Image (cartoon, helix red, strand yellow):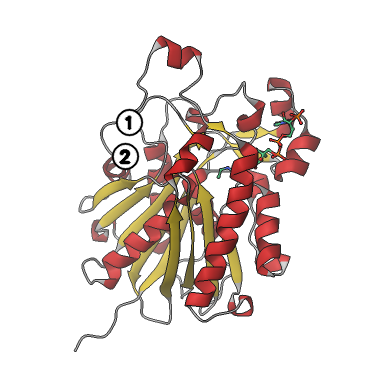
């Protein structure tokens, strides 16, 4: 008789570039204002990686940060899953490169693309590797160099995004920690409202796509905004019902950081007190797959073993969902 193995997050790490792009600088680049950006999005500044470095570098720095904090031997890491929408290359996955740059000799790895929901979706996959008994140490990274795919002449999008990477280690749980359950959804019709249209197999690269700025993020903000609030609210409610929990049982909500007004609306819809909803969008903007692990990294000192965290995200695809986890004792404290 084998007893059920639960997956626990046992360590967190992160990396954000040093270079800050603040609202005052954006005011000089496009027709915008600090007042508009702050009141409409909650963002004050974001980090920019700059030329010569790629998503794999940020992922590797985040992994090294986790390994240094915990003292874990890099050779013990078995798998690296990298959630990203900004791989170093179209062909050749970024995870193996990140693993090599981080000095992991025994890990296999692969990329996972579900846009802003990438980390959330992949948490289920990473947890399954642990729960099945197949692996004992899995790193899950969320990393995006959004500055590589943002058009800094488009005020509708360039104020929103930033660069960063966060990582968690999953291991078999030795306390009550667990990835309890998930509700995930997707709707491919959403692609018309948020995507990088060109550069993939649907629309290759040509003079027209370059001149038309079709290699950068294009978004119908209002449609995405409404769907994000509805999607994150409904999957969170569905998940709580599935787990027989109420909002009162949730100690912390960790939402995708795309817009403070979206975060506030989801919190209000769920009836969660503001103090329980984690927000760091003012410092990093929307880092796509990195928002959730960067929140876990930033706020891990607030989480106590046994706390229930509700993670929720919405992104391109559309992709969205909610996951409930029980926090455990960490190997490291930031
Ligand atoms: O991670 C998942 C993906 N992304 C999201 O979840 C983002 C979802 N959407 C949003 O966060 C919001 O829709 C935005 C922040 C993108 C836009 O906010 P909004 O309140 O929905 O504004 P809007 O798009 O309805 O635009 C209102 C006005 C427009 O002017 P007009 O047409 O009313 O004259 C825009 O041109 O604001 C204008 N505007 C700006 N003004 C100053 C748009 N961007 C800017 C800007 N600065 N940066």
Vertical placement of 5 versus 51: above or below? below
Crowding around mark 2 (Cα neighbors within 10 Å: few <14, some 14 to 19, many 20+) is many
Q: Residue shown at 59%/75% (left/top)?
A: 250
The residue that mark 1 highlights is 89
Label 2 sits on a secondary structure element that is: helix
Height in image: 58 above or below 326? above
85 displayed left or right of 294: left
Where residue 94 is drawn, which disc sits there? 2
Mark 1 residue crowding within 10 angstroms, few (<14) / some (14–19) / many (20+)? few
Mark 2–mark 1 distance (CA, rounded to whole Å): 7 Å
- The spot of residue 309 in percent (x, y) is 54, 70
Circles 2 and 1 in contact, beta carbons < 8 Å: yes
Q: Position of residue 40 (x, y in %)?
A: 74, 42
Q: Residue at the right extreme?
A: 35
Which of marks 1 and 2 precedes in the sequence? Answer: 1
Residue 274 has which mark? none
Residue 210 appears at what percent x and percent y? 45, 15
In this view of the protein, can residue 65 be seen by the observer? no
The quarter holding residue 223 reads top right
Residue occupying the point 29% across, 60% down:
73
């Amino acid at each position: 008789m084998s007893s059920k193995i639960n997956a626990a997050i046992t360590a967190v790490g992160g990396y954000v570039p040093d270079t800050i792009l603040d609202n005052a600088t954006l005011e000089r680049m496009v027709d915008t204002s600090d007042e508009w950006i702050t009141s409409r999005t909650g963002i004050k500044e974001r980090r920019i990686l700059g030329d010569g470095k790629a998503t794999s570098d940020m992922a590797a720095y985040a992994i090294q940060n986790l390994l240094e904090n915990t003292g874990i031997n890099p050779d013990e890491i078995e798998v690296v899953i990298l959630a990203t929408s900004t791989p170093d290359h179209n062909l050749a996955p970024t995870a193996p490169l990140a693993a090599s740059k981080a000095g992991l000799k025994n890990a296999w790895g692969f990329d996972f693309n579900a846009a802003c929901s990438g980390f959330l979706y992949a948490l289920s996959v990473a947890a399954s590797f642990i729960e099945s008994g197949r692996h004992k140490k899995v790193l899950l990274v969320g990393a995006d160099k959004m500055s590589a795919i943002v058009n800094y002449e488009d005020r509708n999008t360039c104020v929103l995004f930033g660069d960063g990477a966060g990582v968690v280690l999953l291991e078999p749980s030795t306390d009550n920690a667990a990835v309890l359950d998930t509700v995930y959804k997707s709707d491919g019709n959403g692609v018309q409202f948020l995507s990088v249209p060109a550069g993939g197999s649907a629309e290759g690269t040509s003079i027209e796509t370059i001149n038309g700025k079709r290699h950068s993020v294009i978004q119908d903000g209002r449609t995405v905004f409404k769907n994000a609030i509805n999607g994150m609210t409904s999957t969170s409610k569905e998940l709580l019902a599935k787990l027989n929990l109420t909002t009162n049982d949730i100690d912390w909500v960790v939402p995708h950081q795309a817009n403070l007004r979206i975060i506030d609306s989801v919190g209000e819809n769920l009836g969660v007190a503001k103090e329980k909803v984690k927000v760091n969008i003012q410092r990093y903007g929307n880092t796509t797959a990195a928002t959730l692990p960067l929140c876990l990294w930033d706020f891990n000192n607030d989480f106590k073993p046994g706390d229930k965290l509700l993670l929720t995200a919405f992104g391109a695809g559309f992709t969205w969902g909610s996951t409930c986890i029980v926090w455990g004792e960490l190997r490291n404290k930031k």
